[in-house]
Image (cartoon, rainbow, N blue to C red):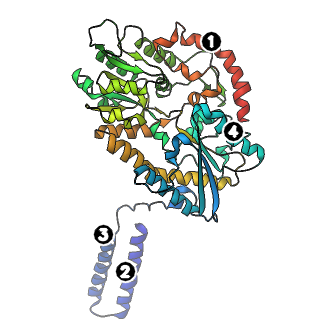
Amino acid sequence: MKKRILSALLATMMLVSCLAACGGGKEGDSTTTATTTAQDAVDATASQTPAETEPPEPTLEEKLGFGETNYEGYVFNMLIAKTDEYEHLAETLTGDLVNDAVYARNTQVEEFFNIDLQIKSMPCAWADRQTFTAEVSKQVLAGDPTWDMVVGQSAVMCTGLNSQYYTNIAEMPGMDLSKPWWIVNQFERLEINGKLFGIYGDMNLSLYGDMHGIFFSSAIIAENKLENPYELVKNNQWTLDKMLTMAEQAGGDLDGTAGAGKEGDRIGIIAIDNPMRAFGTSLGCEVVTRGEDGALVFPAAPSERHIDFYTKISNAFVDGSYNLKFKNDTYEESLQILAEDRALFVPSYLNYISNAIMRDMKGDFGILPYPKYDETQENYISQIGTGATCTTFPQNIANPELAAQVANYMGYLGAETLVSTYFETYLQERLSRTPEMQDMLTLIRETATANLTTVYAALFSPNLVTWFEVSGNIDHGTSLVSKFKANAGPAKKILEKNIMPRFE
């Protein structure tokens, strides 16, 4: 602004000098006229200059860190999980919102780089883990760079990750994990020995569907005059103690039969194995921690926080309480109990919001993030499920720079268009019942993260994530402290002999 005013003054002074040299009128009149003209010019310029200049909107190249490039029809091969084909495989326009958004994204990627996307799917459930990960190891051992990118379920990919077969994403040219379409701080949380082989972000829609959240019955909240859960979240009061207290208040006998049961009683909270493990992340605990040098450490004893939350949740599921413990295969059964307004809280996965049981539920339901440990915890934390897909790159890919660019452009387009179609249109607007629920879904996405213990769980024996799976039915008198003490030696050997060599 100052430069503009100075330029105006200089121009005006030149005009004054010109008028004085040309003469005309009395000297006093000329001076007055010139001074007035100069002041008018300054005032006019100042009035037209905004008090604050807005910075220009970053260009697409500035957002991405690279520009449109012609790769001359390069055939870019992607291997994806058959269970999650909807994320990437869309061969034609069908009228389905998600399919057509994926088709549009893929077309944009092909045109932006002048490449030919070839996408193949293979079964990638837990039972298929050896066959799926073998596709990468066979490629590297044969020296044939078939797959440029491999996207598979996190739990499956974990079993094959190692430096021999996968590219260290931290060293890929042009890969910037600070971009908003990647999950925040994932390198800091998940790297081992400075290496990270799989990443999470908006290029993969299962990130959202497999995210953990807690369903609740609005009718039970109203009937029992319980606090508004949405307000608790907004006011930083949605904590572990609050959740357990509300569950205790809501549970009770409905059928007049002694003892709590899922058929005829109101359940405060339903615990299913995998969703219960997500409490380890949301409450800020890890089983495997890091030393001062960043190296992985298996502590000899659990943290006080871990002991506290483990004890509290375990005590909530003792015999006689109106809380219920399920096994892994009862997700729909738990939702049916919720739909009948006989369960207050059901920790589960966000993709169940689209289940027919939830769509047909007569009463209202809501979704919450997992609670904080207490009000001093800075943020809510939402666990990415191990069924969510992560993106990896074989160690011998032909063009690492192109692979990184494709992943980033897919992530950018995902955040700009694809996620809005899936998450906002499909999950929020079509299936969410209140604006508050939409806010909660957004909060869950913004606080999404991954727990190192959970991501690499399959590399440990015993399976350490079961130590977050807290309920009275699984403890059998064994305390968490005892578990750590008994397994500290074996776990240390696993770290040294099984896990660290993979990341050399």
Q: Is residue 195 visible?
A: no
Name the one closer to the observer, 383 or 28: 383
Distance, label 3 to label 2, CA atoms, is 16 Å
Q: Residue at x 29, y 25 (%)?
A: 340
Tag nearer the camera, 3 or 2: 3
Label 4: how many Cα within 10 Å (few below 14, some 14–19, many 20+) = few
Q: Secondary structure at mark 1?
A: helix
As drawn, 463 above or below 451: above
Q: Is residue 309 visible?
A: yes
User: What's the amino acid at mark 2?
Assistant: Thr
User: What's the amino acid at mark 1?
Assistant: Lys
Point out the image quarter for the C terminus: top right
Looking at marks 3 and 2 on the same chain, the residue that comes earlier in the sequence is marked by: 2
Distance, label 4 to label 3, CA atoms, is 69 Å
As drawn, 363 above or below 400: above
Name the one closer to the observer, 465 or 90: 90
Q: Is residue 474 left or right of residue 391?
A: left
Label 2: how many Cα within 10 Å (few below 14, some 14–19, many 20+) = many
State the residue position of label 4. 134
Distance, label 1 to label 2, CA atoms, is 84 Å
Residue 47's disc is 3
User: What's the amino acid at mark 3?
Assistant: Ser
Measured as percent of width and height from the top left, residue 321 is found at 36, 10
State the residue position of label 2. 12
Tell me whether the residue at label 4 lies in contact with that at label 3, contact meaning CB atoms closer than 8 angstroms.
no
Looking at marks 1 and 3 on the same chain, the residue that comes earlier in the sequence is marked by: 3
Distance, label 1 to label 3, CA atoms, is 74 Å
Measured as percent of width and height from the top left, residue 186 is found at 56, 38
